[in-house]
């Protein structure tokens, strides 16, 4: 019975981290669908979400208001990033654009270090710290918030993309940019909006995880890499695949940390990525990039 409780504890921890990875992976997927590039600055938007929310809360704003304003401000930063860094170089190769996102991520992290310093900051949990008991295992209320809000955000994103005019325009622009232009869709506007939407998801992930991991200027690097791993594992470009990849990665990491050693936590994530690339390059959901076919 004690062993089952221990395994259940690992599972709950994995679901919490997996939910965050899923949101970050969705950000990668949105931009990949719109531009066919990988935005390696995505993790820095997670970091900005956490630190901006912490700063707003320290100024006396309530936690919900700080959450919403942080997401809005980081969304604007995502829109500016596309306008100032990506759009001027849109005629270059995809490799060049990817390198630009890497450089942009380094720049954002450096500016964050100058503004917030190297100290770690904390954000209070959304609804207390008293752990809940489930079959002998404990789960923090913040973990429930993370999983619940992830479900809401993923469902809202799917509804937006499939049942709103703007969402359908975004999907049309990603499927066939030329045809989208012919029917009057401004593809450049859709690409910019995809960066804003991606930044919003990253910011939300950062605010939700800040009460557990705290916010620090370099927190986005590893989270971004884990989100990228989740996106590739699930199937880059597939929303459902990204969610599945995030949960698989989070749970696998938790079990590896608990049953083997926490020192292998990060290495295990990249080992899973390599195995998927070798055995099923299109990801678990079988998505194949239409641009490569």
Image: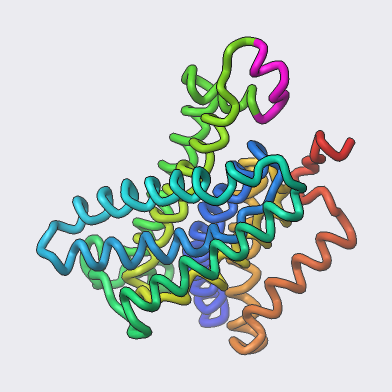
Q: Residue furthest left?
A: 60
User: What residue sits 43% from the left and 68% below the top?
Assistant: 135
Q: Which colour style is shown?
A: rainbow
User: What residue sits 58% from the left and 42% below the top?
Assistant: 87
Q: Nearer the viewer, residue 135 or 129?
A: 129
User: What residue sits 45% from the left and 61% below the top?
Assistant: 46
| In-image side of 292 versus 125 (left or right) | right
User: What residue sits 47% from the left and 28% below the top?
Assistant: 160
Residue 42 placed where, x, y %? 54, 58
Residue 136 appearing in the image: no
| In-image side of 142 versus 289 (left or right) | left
Task: Point out the stretch of residues depicted in magenta.
Answer: 174-182
Q: Quadrant of the C terminus?
A: top right
Residue 189 placed where, x, y %? 52, 30
Total number of numbered discs in the rendering: 0
Indicate whether residue 17 is drawn in magenta. no
- Can you say whether 22 is above or below 285 in the image? below
Residue 261 placed where, x, y %? 63, 89
Q: Residue 256 occupies which quadrant of the picture?
A: bottom right
Q: Nearer the viewer, residue 237 or 190?
A: 190
Residue 24 appearing in the image: yes
Classified by dominant secondary structure, the portion drawn in magenta counts as helix
Residue 2 placed where, x, y %? 51, 82
| In-image side of 267 versus 80 (left or right) | right
Q: Residue furthest top?
A: 183
- Can you say whether 204 is above or below 168 in the image? below
- Can you say whether 268 is above or below 108 in the image? below
- Can you say whether 200 is above or below 227 in the image? above
């Amino acid at each position: 019975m004690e062993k089952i409780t221990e395994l259940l504890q690992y599972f709950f921890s994995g679901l919490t981290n997996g939910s965050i990875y899923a949101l970050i992976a969705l950000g990668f997927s949105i931009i990949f669908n719109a531009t066919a590039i990988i935005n390696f600055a995505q993790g820095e938007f997670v970091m900005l979400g956490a630190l901006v929310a912490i700063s707003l809360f320290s100024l006396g704003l309530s936690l919900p208001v700080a959450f919403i304003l942080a997401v809005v401000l980081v969304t604007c930063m995502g829109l500016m990033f596309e306008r100032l860094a990506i759009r001027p170089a849109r005629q270059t190769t995809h490799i060049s654009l990817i390198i630009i996102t890497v450089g942009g991520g380094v720049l954002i992290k450096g500016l964050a270090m100058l503004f917030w310093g190297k100290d770690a900051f904390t954000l209070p949990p959304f609804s207390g710290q008293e752990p809940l008991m489930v079959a002998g295992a404990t789960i923090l209320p913040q973990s429930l918030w993370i999983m619940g809000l992830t479900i809401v955000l993923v469902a809202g994103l799917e509804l937006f993309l499939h049942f709103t005019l703007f969402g359908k325009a975004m999907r049309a622009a990603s499927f066939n940019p030329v045809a989208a232009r012919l029917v009057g869709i401004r593809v450049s506007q859709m690409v910019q909006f995809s960066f804003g939407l991606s930044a919003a998801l990253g910011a939300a992930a950062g605010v939700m995880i800040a009460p557990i991991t705290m916010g620090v200027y370099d927190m986005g690097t590893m989270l971004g890499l884990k989100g990228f791993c989740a996106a590739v594992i699930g199937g880059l470009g597939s929303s459902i695949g990204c969610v599945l990849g995030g949960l698989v990665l989070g749970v696998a990491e938790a079990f590896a940390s608990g049953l083997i050693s926490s020192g292998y936590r990060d290495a295990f994530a990249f080992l899973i990525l390599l195995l998927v690339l070798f055995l099923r390059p299109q990801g678990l959901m079988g998505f194949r990039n239409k641009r490569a076919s």
